[in-house]
Amino acid sequence: MDSGLDFDSFARLARARRTHMIVDRDRPVGDDVIGQLCELATWAPCHKKTWPWRFASLTGDARARLGEAFAADMADRDFGDEGKREKTRTKYTRTPNILVVGCAPDAKPTIHDENRDAVAAGVQNLLLGATALGLASFWSTPPLIDSPCALDLCGFAADDRIVAVIYLGHPNGTVEVPVRPTPAVTHLT
Ligand SMILES: Cc1cc2nc3c(=O)[nH]c(=O)nc-3n(C[C@H](O)[C@H](O)[C@H](O)COP(=O)(O)O)c2cc1C
């Protein structure tokens, strides 16, 4: 199918995406846009059509509740020191929107791993969509991918895993562009 997009336009979009959270804290992204971005994520390739992605959109007090949920399980498992737990309690309030992206498990180990690959591909779709809309995005690793309190808060199943906690907002600043090393490509004929 013809995408209608030329390579240079797509390359500009891919290169323009930056990991940052310099945003207007008082200007949330609307639920309709969040919905559009999650839908875009679902166009990622997905082996065996397991559609493993799960999404939770958090604004307002829910962002602090997410931090509290992670911190509770960190304390329960003696993970990280009190300083790290304290930071976790508040860090998700740094942007007006937080999107938690989860991944469903699979009984077959190969599909289980591929589910996570598919979700990661979906996250990239989502980040590129956010960039195209002029939004700032930041893919962060959760403190615990299997935090029962965070999974429950997000409405995910107990055996789902958290792949990304994405900070989102309207940018009011920029960051430096990290230089990309030239990829090593083996050409075989
Ligand atoms: C799976 C994954 C997890 C990441 N987790 C974090 C994180 O926890 N904290 C962070 O500062 N950046 C995180 N990043 C973002 C990278 O730091 C960022 O992509 C890298 O610095 C390159 O910058 P760029 O995205 O602006 O090109 C993560 C990226 C990926 C792909």
Image (cartoon, rainbow, N blue to C red):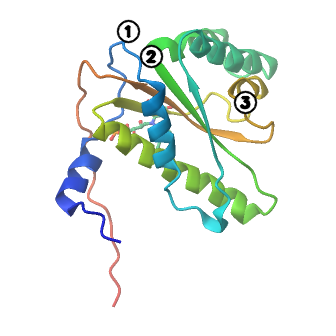
Q: Amino acid at mark 3?
A: Gly
The local secondary structure at tag 2 comes to loop
Within-10-Å neighbours for mark 2: few <14, some 14–19, many 20+: many
The local secondary structure at tag 1 comes to loop
Within-10-Å neighbours for mark 1: few <14, some 14–19, many 20+: few
Residue 129 shown left or right of residue 83 in the figure:
left
Question: Which of the two residues, 138 or 54, is positioned nearer the viewer here?
Answer: 54
Question: Which of the two residues, 4 or 142, is positioned nearer the viewer here?
Answer: 4
Quadrant hosting residue 73: top right
The local secondary structure at tag 3 comes to loop
Give me the residue at 68% from left, 20% from top: 70
Give me the residue at 48% from left, 26% from top: 31
Residue 92 shown left or right of residue 51 in the figure:
left
Quadrant hosting residue 165: top right
Look at the numbered discs 1 and 2 and tell me whether their residues touch, using CB distance below 8 Å: yes
Q: Amino acid at mark 2?
A: Pro
Question: Which of the two residues, 118 or 42, is positioned nearer the viewer here?
Answer: 42
Number of marks in the rendered image = 3
Residue 98 shown left or right of residue 111 in the figure:
left
Residue at numbered disc 2: 96
Quadrant showing the N terminus: bottom left
Sequence-wise first label, 1 or 3: 1
On the image, the x and y values in percent for residue 189 come to 33, 91
Look at the numbered discs 1 and 3 and tell me whether their residues touch, using CB distance below 8 Å: no
User: Residue 26, labelled with which disc?
Assistant: 1
Q: Gap between marks 1 and 3, in whole Å?
A: 26 Å
Residue at numbered disc 3: 155
Looking at the picture, does residue 177 appear above or below residue 97? below
